[in-house]
Structure formats: C-alpha cells, structure tokens
Amino acid sequence: MLIDYGSVPPVPEFRKTGPHLSNYRRVYEASEQAAARSDIGPDALAKYLGTYERLGVRHVVVKARDVETTFGFRVSNEDVAAFCRAHGPRFIGFAGVDPNKGMVAIRELEHAVKELGLRGLNLQCFEHKLRINDAKMYPLYAKCIELGIPVNLHCSINFSTSVLMEYGHPRFLDEVMVHFPELRVCASPPGWPWVHELIGVAWRHVNVFIGLVAVRPKYLGVANSGYEPLLQYGNSILQDRVIFGSAFPMQPVERAVSEVEALGLKPEVKRKWFHDNAARFLGLD
C-alpha cells in the first residue's frame, strides 16, 4: 500500500510558474529529464494516471498554490478540486491560499474545505516572502485546527534567488508548534541544509511530520550528503513521522519508490513511510 504525498499532474492548470523558479530548473535538470518521457506528449496524463494504477497507489496528494500577491499567479483551489473529482477518490486535494491577502485567505480556505472538499492547506512560505512564524500565518494555522485539516509547509532551502533561503528554516516551525500544539504539520522538503534542526523540531513536537519530498531518496544513504540523519532517525525514534512523496515531475514516481525500497529500512518502517504515516497525517481510516 502506498500514498504519494506530493505529485503535480501533467495538465496546464497545475503547471503555472514564474521566473522566480527558473533556478529550480537548473538544480533539478537531471531528475526532471528522467521524468520527462512520461511528462510530455498527448498521452502524458494517461501515462501519469497509469503509473499510479500500476503501482496500486491508494492516494495521491495534489496541491493548490496561491502566490498572486508576490509573483502574480495561482494554481487554484477550484482546479485542484475539479481534478480530484474527475479522477476519483485516489486523488486528495490540498488548498492553497495567500496569507498576504488577510481575511480573504481565511474565507477562501474555509470555502475550499467546506464547499470544494479539499482536505489540507499548502503554504510555500518562501513564495509568500514570509517566515513560517510570521504573524500573517497564524490566523490560517488557527483555521486549520478549527477545520480539522493538516497543513503542508515548505521547510528547507529554496532555490529561488528572488527570495531569502531562510524563510523555510525549521527553527520558525518550532515556535509555531509551541503556540499551536494541535496543528498537524508536514514539513517538506525535509529540511536540508538544516536536517538536524528539523529532526529536533519533530522530536519535540508529536504533530510534526517530515515529508520526504523533492529529494532523491537514495541520498539518505549517501555519506556526507547531509540527509543521512533522516535515515538514522527515520528508521528509529521518528519512524512514525516520515512521509513519502515523489514530487513528480521533479523525479519519476517509480524511481523514487525503488530508491526508498533500497534504503534497507525495517519492513514495518517501510510500510509506515510509504503509507501508514501519511494515512494518519491525512486523517484517513
């Protein structure tokens, strides 16, 4: 059983971007080229859906994103909800709102959950030019608790040279969790170059999960990569808190799965990374 916590469908509604992300294409060039054969052409969507059918994936999380205030575009909640409706219960949608819009964002989140059926909130804080603990974020965290939904937070380096890399530092998440201990958070990507700090935050706060997203899983087993502590702690005291996500099209789904398989995890831990932890985080039966 498998849940892919991070995937971007190959349809125009999900592929909106801006020049602030151009450096990502340089950093992820090799992985994206490996995924490209299933990401282009008239049958790209059929291949995408077929991959998840072939792997027997239970759920795939797809996320909206609103960065209109800072970068002028959005992947809308309506489009995410429509994709999930069109392609069945395998797909779970997360809302995206812009904290810089104040009460508009609060109302949009409530509408997305109560009317559109989305089941979480996605905040890429570096794209909002806000730290995780910025006061503009706090009303959204409170609303997530009220609605009973989890939140995905970008908690790592970002490669956009238009914004500061420190926006995603895990130390800011620690403060949020002190103030909102009931909040269910998945910090993804998994903290690099502050992996130890993120592990410390997750160890301190039982509602913090670590999303193994947008990084090749094989690097967890590579000496001096900076990711090794995730394998050590994720195979032991934090085994209930690591969540797998392919980040397609940043890398092929099947390759990401096979690289986790090759890490030498204990069987019960592998099951947790691939399914059980995400199911608990998402509030699934």
Image: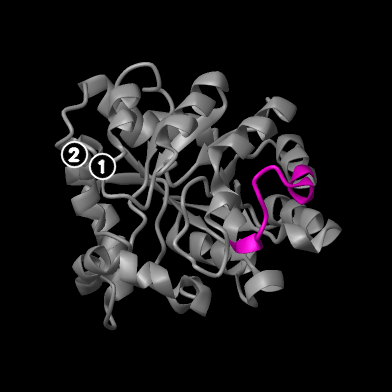
Q: Amino acid at mark 2?
A: Val
Q: What residue is shown with label 1?
A: 225
The relative height of residue 271 versus residue 41 in the rendered view (above or below) is above
In the rendered image, the quadrant that contains the N terminus is top left
Would residue 136 be counted in the magenta stretch? yes
Q: Residue at x 79, y 46 (%)?
A: 135
Q: What residue is shown with label 2?
A: 222
Residue toward you, 140 or 14: 140
Q: How many numbered marks are there?
A: 2
Say which mark, if any, is on residue 242. none
Is residue 279 shown to the viewer in this render?
A: no
Which residues fall within the magenta stretch?
127-138
At label 2, counting other C-alpha atoms closer than 10 Å, the crowd grade (few under 14, some 14-19, many 20 or more) is: few
Task: Where is residue 248? Give x, y as percent.
Answer: 34, 60
Q: Residue at x 27, y 67 (%)?
A: 32
Residue toward you, 140 or 9: 140
Task: Where is residue 215? Give x, y as percent.
Answer: 32, 50
Q: Are marks 1 and 2 in contact (CB under 8 Å)?
A: yes
Label 1 to label 2: alpha-carbon separation: 6 Å
Q: Amino acid at mark 1?
A: Ser
